Amino acid sequence: MPQVFRLRCSLPTATGDTIQLAHGGGGRMMHSLIERLFLPAFSNSYLEARHDSAVVRIGNDRIAFTTDTYVVSPLFFPGGDIGKLAVYGTVNDLAMAGARPLYLSAGFILEEGLPLETLEAIVRSMREAAGIAGVELVAGDTKVVDRGKGDGVFINTAGIGLVAPEVDISPARVAPGDAILLSGDVGRHGITIMSLREGLGFETPLQSDCASLWPLIAALLEARIEIHCLRDLTRGGLASTLNEIATDAGVGISIDEAAVPKCEAVAAACEILGLDPLYVANEGRFAAFIAPRDASRAIEILKAHETTASIIGTVGNRGPGLVDAKGPFGHSRILDLLSGEQMPRIC
């Protein structure tokens, strides 16, 4: 879906003639709301591209532009915080269009009574993340809302990046035969947040995978890997991402569930909580749709940065919009969009 409206963000969904808060935004209800309300109201060629960023031409240059809003609870978690998440999340959306991230804006909605030291810690984290990601925060805004109306702080970020002339990455380029690559193990971010909420402890410390993905994408582009499409696996996880791509590109997708890496703590937590790890959110992982001749070389490049990168499936022409996963005993199951979301307020 057009990520200008952030399919995977926490937005309300339509029920009858009213708007009610849904558990997240990566499922069937949000998909319906975007298709029924936002697209008809604002339809244009950039939204119809259904990408993580809008790619627009200004003079001889192509610019990627995106926006996202962060409402994660709790504000601080192992491996990150809302500030780090706000920087890397927007940088990653630019990277998914093959754009080199350049500039960010930030809007802060602050709740009355928020401790100044909390805000200072968030700002420091954003500054550090921006330095690591190689972007500058060049514009911003603050608003204060009444006590009890903002849950501490919400952050909106928008980002601009530059797309090289030879780069052409979008769902429209996905084609039968494409190899589907996964940049690393899944579920770390979502389970880290949920473990804090549920008071779960693990023998092996678990932390969010929150990170900038641009270095990985830059390495693939520099090696001239033929990338057809990229998508970061945020809200709704791997399964929701594959459903979006299958629907938007009009293709079928088949994956081998055993090829999807999961760390032991994530697998154990999902079993305890009754969650499907394929639907659990990530903040430092992406799926890549690659020309089959380049798949092995692309994996070598990714494994130089992330040892759990793997080829997990292929694109077919049977059953457009259908995603199926082969299980460990040879049986297959359909991976559908969830009607809601497994875990709210995780980004």
Image: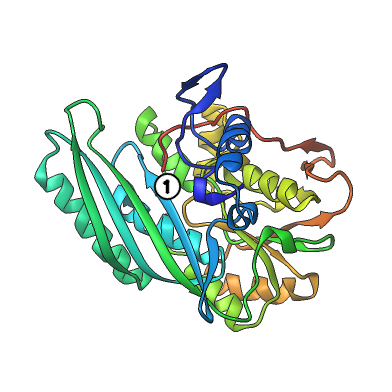
| Horizontal side, residue 247 vs residue 148: left or right | right
Q: Give whichever of 166, 334 is nearer the camera.
A: 166
Q: Residues within 10 Å of mark 1 (few under 14, many from 20)?
A: few
In this rendering, the count of numbered labels is 1
Residue ID at (21%, 25%): 148
- In x, y percent, where is residue 4? 51, 51
Where's the C terminus, which quadrant?
A: top left
- In x, y percent, where is residue 338? 63, 31
Q: Give whichever of 312, 127 is nearer the camera.
A: 127
- In x, y percent, where is residue 278? 62, 42
Q: Give whichever of 200, 164 is nearer the camera.
A: 164
State whether residue 32 is above or below residue 314: above
Report which residue position mark 1 lands on: 204
Residue ID at (11%, 33%): 113
Q: Is residue 209 visible?
A: no
Q: Is residue 38 visible?
A: yes
**In what element is the residue under mark 1?**
loop
Residue ID at (55%, 19%): 15
| Horizontal side, residue 39 vs residue 159: left or right | right
User: Label 1 amino acid?
Assistant: Thr
| Horizontal side, residue 192 vs residue 229: left or right | left
- In x, y percent, where is residue 12? 47, 29
State whether residue 182 is above or below residue 325: below
